[in-house]
Amino acid sequence: MRKMRVAKEDVLKLYQRLNDEAEASGYHLNPDIEFTKELIRGLLTNEQRYGYWACPCRLASGAREEDLDIVCPCDYRDHDLTEYDQCYCALYVSEKVVRGEKTTGSIPERRGTTQEKAKAGSSSKAISELSFPVWRCRVCGYLCARETPPEICPICKARRERFEKFI
C-alpha cells in the first residue's frame, strides 16, 4: 500500500481556513494546535485516499454515499458539542474547552444509534400547500425552502449532498 504524503503547508493552510470558517460560524477548533493539525492531516489523507474528508477518527467505507454522515463536519458534530463539549474526534470543541474549563476525552460513538430521519411529506394541509420543499442541513440543522438545496450551507459550509428533504 502506498503511503499518503500530506505537505506541512497544506495542513497549515487548511488549519487556517477551517479555523476562520469555524469562528465566523460560531464554532471553535480544538485549542491544542498540534493535535488539531494532526486531525487535519488525517482529513487531507482521507481526501487523497477517498476523495472526501472522512472523519479521521472513524473507519470510512470509501463509498461517499455511505459515508456522507461522517464527512467533516459530520452530521453528529452539533449533538456531540451540546452533550460532550466536543465532536467525536475533538476537532470541534465548545467554548468551555476553549476557555480551559473542560478538557477533551473519549466520547461515545453516536453513528448508527441516532440516524432517525425526518419523513418527507405530511398529511397536514398547511404543509401540503407549501410552494417549495424544505431542505435541512444534516450537519447543523439549517432549513431553507426552495426548489433544490443550496450548493453550500451558509451556516456550516457543508455541501449540497449533506441536505435532506425535510418537508
Image (tube, rainbow, N blue to C red):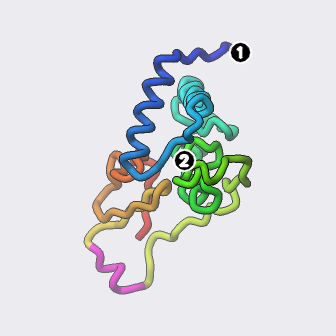
Q: Residue furthest front?
A: 100
Magenta part of the protein: which range?
124-130
Q: How many marks?
A: 2
In which quadrant of the rendered view does residue 90 lie?
A: top right
Provide residue 159's location: percent of width, then percent of height: 41, 45
The C terminus - image quarter = bottom left
Provide residue 28's location: percent of width, then percent of height: 49, 46
- As measured in the structure, the alpha-carbon distance from the residue carrying label 1 to the one carrying label 2 is 38 Å
Q: Of tags 1 and 2, which is closer to the observer?
A: 2
Residue drawn at x 59%, y 50% as measured from the top left? 97
List the residue tagged with mark 2: 98
Q: Residue furthest left?
A: 131
Residue drawn at x 43%, y 46% as measured from the top left? 158
Residue 34 left/right relative to 167: right
Q: Confirm whether residue 86 shows in the render.
A: no
Query: Judging from the image, what secondary structure is the residue with disc 2 in?
Result: helix
Mark with earlier residue (1, 2): 1
Provide residue 115's location: percent of width, then percent of height: 62, 61
Residue drawn at x 57%, y 61% as measured from the top left? 82
Q: Which of the pair 56/17 is nearer the observer?
A: 17
Amino acid on which the number 1 mark rests in the picture: Met
Q: Which of the pair 25/152 is nearer the observer?
A: 25
Residue 94 left/right relative to 153: right
Q: Is residue 142 placed above or below 92 in the rendered structure?
A: below
Q: Is residue 34 placed above or below 115 in the rendered structure?
A: above
Q: Residues within 10 Å of mark 1 (few under 14, many from 20)?
A: few
List the residue tagged with mark 1: 1
